[in-house]
Image (cartoon, grey):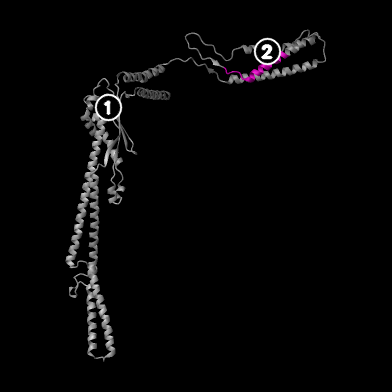
Amino acid sequence: MTQDSQAPAADRSEPQEPEETGRARAGKPRGGRKRRRGGAAAEPVELRPQQPAAETEAEAAETAADGAAADAGDGPDAGDAPPQPGRSRGRRQKKKLRKWRSQARAALAELEAVRDQQPAFPVARSAHMKRRHWGLAASFVLMVLAPLAATVFYLFAVAGDQYASTAGFTVRSQESSGANDLLGGLASFAGSSTASDSDILYEFIQSQELVAAVEARTGLRAHYSGRWPQDWVFALWPRATMEDLTWYWQRMVRIAYDGGSGLTEVQVTAFDPQMAQAITRAIVEESQIRINALNDQARADAMRYAEADLAEALERLKGAREALTRFRTRTRIVDPEADIQGRMGVMNNLQQQLAEALIEYDLLAGSVAPGDVRLNKAQQKIDVIRARIDSERQTFASSNTDTGGVGEDYPSLISEYERLTVDREFAEEAYRAALTALEAARDDAARQSRYLASYITPTLAEAAEYPRRHVLSALIGLFLLLVWAILVLIFYSIRDRN
């Protein structure tokens, strides 16, 4: 009984040693390094990664196995109890528990080996401002905040109010239907010149000529330089030349032009509402003067061209008629066609006489003797008629005047006469067309074909709309921020490369 009681005691004492070892191992700090105290910098503390779930389960299984073995081996009066039938079953359970415990220890040792192989991560130090961070903050203040503050102060405290005046107009064209009817609708192919006139007017408003005309009427230089040098951004310097004034004109005058409809809208800004309206009215009046000048020039050109065409057509008609007169004088034939018709009548008459003489000769030959005098006279008459017919035929194709010709063959005369006749008819038609065009040009010159139609009269402002202080401040701030961000990105890219 003493040996039996000592055996369980030995068995009970065996599982306690790994439990204490496990607890001591669990209580021991893992993979940590103590920081050095003193002047030297502290070394980074290495942190082990968190234990896997399998390691935790293995430790839990080991602990449970130790507890179960302790419960099975320990108990009140365990050594003095007599042997029971279930003792063998308890031993088998102890063997299973030992097997589980050994497996748990093996798994735990494997997990510890894997954990020791994993690298340790240093703990990051606390963030603090460095010199480059202070430099970025200072650059942001100098490049963004300070210019933006100066801009806002200038716009809201120094810049003067500007008043806007708006006018809208378009170039209209009055077409004449009489000219189109006279020319047979050919004028419709020329199209309308309203769009081109609007383009000319758009360029004229931005030209130095208009700036000089408006300066002479309203005194632009004196008005826009009145706020110099207080408002040096929006004002004009006093000693500005005409080229400088033209450049400044592009800032104070805004033009909106629609090429499809031909509508033009002009907006003028000035430091006084009455001055803005006066400048806008001067622009409209000068534009009307320019359209009238273009209209007068177009009418003068049309009249000049029509008169030149008429004079040319008249000279051509005179030349054609003179050539026909010279032909008639040379050939002494007024109308070759009528002359040849007369000659053809003579030929027909001779042919008829020849036929009658032949019939008469045949009748005599059947009734008289062959040597009769009447028969000889009939034959003589036939010969004379045939000779005359031959002579008349020769006059058509021969230029010999001995045979009764005019000195030239009739085919050439007829060809020359037809050519001269065609030239005369063409000259007459050209003369009629030129005369019609001249009448149409006079009809157009009698009315104003182009004029300036205003659909918005120059307005008088009651409140200042410019400068748009909030919009300008926002745009300048955004621009400064973008420039600063780009420079910072360039700086860090160069720093990373180095």
Which span of residues is magenta-colored? 48-68
Q: Crowding at label 1, few (<14), some or many (≥20) Cα neighbours within 10 Å? A: many
**Quadrant showing the C terminus:** top left
Q: What residue do we see at 55% from left, 20% from top? A: 119
C-alpha span from label 2 to label 1 = 100 Å
Q: What residue do we see at 19% from left, 64% from top? A: 327
- The residue at which mark 2 appears reads as 19
Secondary structure at badge 2 equals: helix
Given residues 419 and 12, the one toward you in this image is 419
In the image, is 271 to the left or to the right of 132?
Answer: left
Q: Position of residue 130 (x, y in %)?
A: 42, 16
In the image, is 80 to the left or to the right of 476?
Answer: right
Taking the image as drawn, is residue 393 in sight? no
Secondary structure at badge 1 equals: helix
Image height of 382 relative to 336, above or below: below
- The residue at which mark 1 appears reads as 276
- Magenta span: chief secondary structure: helix
Given residues 293 and 153, the one toward you in this image is 293
Q: Position of residue 167 (x, y in %)?
A: 30, 31
Q: Quarter of the image holding residue 214? A: top left
Amino acid beneath label 2: Glu
Q: Position of residue 51 (x, y in %)?
A: 61, 18
